[in-house]
Image: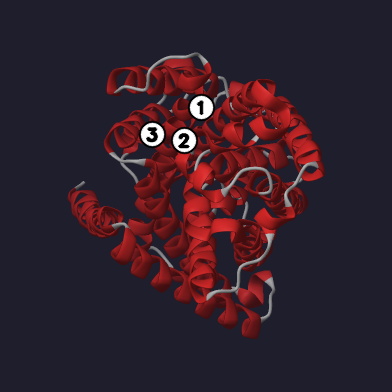
Amino acid sequence: MSKIRTKKIGLWEAVSIAVGTMIGASIFSVFGVGAKVAGKNLPEAFIISGLLALLVAYSYAKLSKKIISNAGPIEFILRGIGDNPITGALSILMWLSYVVSISLFAKGFTGYFLPLVHINDTALTTGITEVLLIAVFTALNSFGSKTVGKAEFYIVALKLSILGVFIVLGLISINPEYVTLSISSSSIQGTLSAAVIFFLSYMGFGLVTNASEDIKNAEKNVPRAIFISIAIVLVVYVSVSLAAIGNLSIPDLIKAQDNALAVAAKPFLGNFGFTLISIGALFSIASALNATLYGGANIAYSLAKDRELPEFFERKAWHHSPEGLYVTAGLGLVFALTFNMGAIAAIISAIFTIIYIFVLISHYRLVKTVGGNKILLIMNIVILLAVFTYLIYYQWQNQRNAFWGTLITLAGVLVIEYIHRYLKKGN
């Protein structure tokens, strides 16, 4: 790649990329959706999601010590089960997951930005905001990994400071009745449903592996960054959710679905709190978008080199960045303009769960090479299969458009992969 992309990033810049994506994913973007599903058991749902993430992180950490590639989990799967149509379809699916994630962050940003600047939320204003946002961070990503890493470090530091104010003051003024654990059957079911949906909340740790070629001392720093980022985010998720549901009733949180945390800050910080959290949300979601564009472009470039994606993803365009960056950004905008936030979140969760299952299977097959406990891996695979089954069932029962969107996405990538392989044979 060009010189502009050869500068290495350090451990804390790598952690920032992961934390930037994860915190932007759920605390600001889909917090209202979580309150609707889990009710006042939302903190417990985040804890369960974090434990599920650690099951997957165990395999990512073991594999990333031996396999250094910006293709990340797809390279793990290629080493584990070989190059075949399933692996190829998963490659496209992995890249597509970043595309869909970009649309989620663009929608989340718009939900906070328009009320903050007192602009009516219409199809036109939403569309213009999403286009400009994605264009700005596409331009930033064209300057390479070091620029992205530095931007993430400072943005993450700023948003964690803002969230720290929210957490400390929110916990001081908490209403104990609002945070009492509910153990009714419907509440437990809602908690499990939210935990499965918010599996998405921790997906950002995988971005570290998609930057492994750009990280100093990757065999040590990639596993460290994975576990450090999950630990930081777990504490933040639980603390923020406690402060939010402890100061605003669940019906009010659900009503303020697009900018729930900003509204939750009003009872103890007034209008200043609304403005402060809205600004924090904008920085948070913007950093998540920035990191996801970086990961998506990296994986597109790496897969194109391995001929798992068409060659034009590897070609250089403006500022020596690969065309895959612009294709990733463009398709992300298409998804943002097409689907609602709840459906996008459910589709991403399903996609990532499938990829995680295959990573764990690959780890099992490579355990003699990379290390690990086979019995633990079998248990983890069974748990992930149960999570995926429950997620699909939840989509069928509650988000039928997301259910069909997931199936169409899976079928579509298989068709695209078979066509791609057929055309490769002809060359």
Q: Residue 313 location in percent, x, y?
A: 37, 34
Left or right of 160: which side holds 20? left
Q: Which mark is residue 112?
A: 1
Query: Please, what is the three-letter code of the amino acid marked with disc 2?
Result: Asp
Q: Secondary structure at mark 2?
A: helix
Circle 3 residue: 328
Q: Secondary structure at mark 3?
A: helix
Q: Is residue 134 visible?
A: yes
Residue at image position (39%, 40%) is 99
Count of residue discs? 3
| Front of the two marks 1 and 3 | 1
> In front: 287, or 363?
287
Query: Distance from label 2 to label 3 (Cα)?
Result: 25 Å
Circle 2 residue: 258
Q: Secondary structure at mark 1?
A: helix
* Disc nearer the start of the sequence (2/3): 2
Residue at image position (72%, 33%) is 268
Q: Which mark is residue 161?
A: none
